[in-house]
Amino acid sequence: MSRRADGTEARFHAFIDEALREISGRDEDFLTLFPIALPDPKRAARKSAADLASRGWPADELERVLERGNDYVRSRYRTVEGREETFFAEWVAAAVIDAHQAAAGAIPLQAVAGTRRPVRDVLEADYDLRSTAGGTRYFVRKKGSFPVVLINATGLPIESWQRLLDDGSHDYKLIVPERSHGDIFAGGVERDVSCEDEAREIVSIVENEAIDAVHVLAWCNGARLAVEVATLLGGRAASLTLLAPMFKGIDGVGKSLTRYERDLQTILDIVKKDPKMAAMFAKKISDVAVPVNWSKASQDDAEQLEEIFWSPNCRNVKLLNVPLMSADSLVNVARRVATDETHPTVRRLSELSVPMMVVLGTHDNVVSNKNTLSVLRAAGARSANVLIVGAGHDIHDLQYHYLRYALSYFVDRAEVPAATARVRVLERDETV
């Protein structure tokens, strides 16, 4: 049976389109304004064959796959050749190889369409609202076999997790706490609440549900809270997944920070010392929290065009800055960050015996991967460290299908994810 007859070719094309939506999600006009750099099939095949040697892929087979991928991309999008050594072309090659593997059913990567229902509607329709005896409210998905506590970044609206919350195809019984620092839908840090207090509230939810084994999934600066939750849960924690974790400000660990982290810390230090400055900074942050304008970029400047990979989903630019865009919230963020950085994170990590996976993106402009890995090494953490090529900070949105891929191994099967062309499983002491 031909690939066309059994639907494999259509799935191959669909996965390529899914990858390219990661670009148009960052800027909806980018693929119209600028050409896609295509890989040289022969060169990319040799490189990929070496990288995927354990899978036994011969270079000539990879070359044919890449030729088919190039043909499809040429038929649908503007393209340019002669930029084979750029990251963009290498990313396209990796995306095509993963698309081929996924279409053939060789890797459990799924193109998850989903809907764009507002999260408030999703939670009202598909989740039950419950409360502990202490008054902590939380949402529980009505279906699912694997209990998963979802810990959002502190102060961010839960809308950022729309794809996971609204995906009816997974088997996770998601538990979404209404954390006491602020409104789950509006975001912001309305109250100065410690990491330890919020951890106790989340553990009370698990106790209220009488769950013997629960998985914990956290993003960004929710990582410290997740580590504390896992510590308090003890043997009831089935696994801990940290997505783009922020472990800034730990004494004794190298301070390799992103520009975002350095600039933000400067503002927080000023606001903590003089809260009256918060209104001015909040307005400035609000004014600059807009998507990058690509209309004046040169289509001939390959290096500039690759900056697109550092951008979040254009819908998330404001959302990612919500905690910083009001004076009161900014003051509380400054206080919360200061207390979070006194948390004994390294000691807690060193004491944890729960299976742990850390998922990183190569192009995270918010969190330093180098710093994250330094903290894990300092703690002697035996975590599975997974790096997604071409992903930024909002992996659970733009690279949602890869997050699902990683979880399908780690939560569903208690296994480390298998490497693919775009998924690197780092060695214990490997740096990035």
Image (cartoon, rainbow, N blue to C red):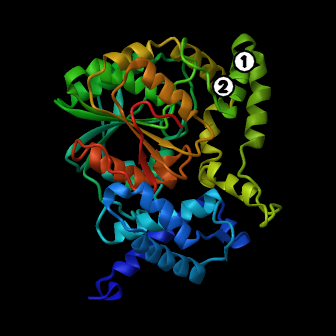
Above or below for 61 versus 385:
below
Using the image, tell me which numbered label, if any, was put on residue 271: 1
User: In the image, 178: left or right of 209?
Assistant: right
Assess disc 1: are there few (<14), some (14-19) or many (≥20) residues with their C-alpha within 10 Å of its C-alpha. many
Assess disc 2: are there few (<14), some (14-19) or many (≥20) residues with their C-alpha within 10 Å of its C-alpha. many
Secondary structure beneath disc 1? helix
Q: What amino acid type is highlighted by mark number 2?
A: Leu
Above or below for 283 versus 164:
above
Q: Can you say which quadrant of the picture contains the C terminus?
A: top right
Q: Residue at x 60, y 41 (%)?
A: 320
* Residue 204 x %, y %: 28, 22
* Residue 54 x %, y %: 33, 55
Above or below for 148 versus 333:
below
Q: Residue at x 76, y 59 (%)?
A: 294
- Per the image, the residue denoted by label 2 is 330
User: In the image, 230: left or right of 71?
Assistant: left
Write down the quadrant of residue 322 in the picture. top right
**In the rendered structure, are the residues bearing label 1 and label 2 in contact, judged by CB atoms less than 8 Å apart?**
yes
* Residue 206 x %, y %: 25, 28
Is residue 152 or residue 230 the one in the foreground?
A: 230
User: In the image, 165: left or right of 432?
Assistant: left
Q: Residue at x 57, y 27 (%)?
A: 189
Q: Earlier in the sequence, mark 1 or mark 2?
A: 1
Write down the quadrant of residue 379 in the picture. top left
Q: Residue at x 44, y 28 (%)?
A: 223
Spatial CA distance of label 1 from label 2 is 8 Å
Q: Is residue 182 something one can see in this rendering?
A: no
Q: Can you say which quadrant of the picture contains the N terminus?
A: bottom left
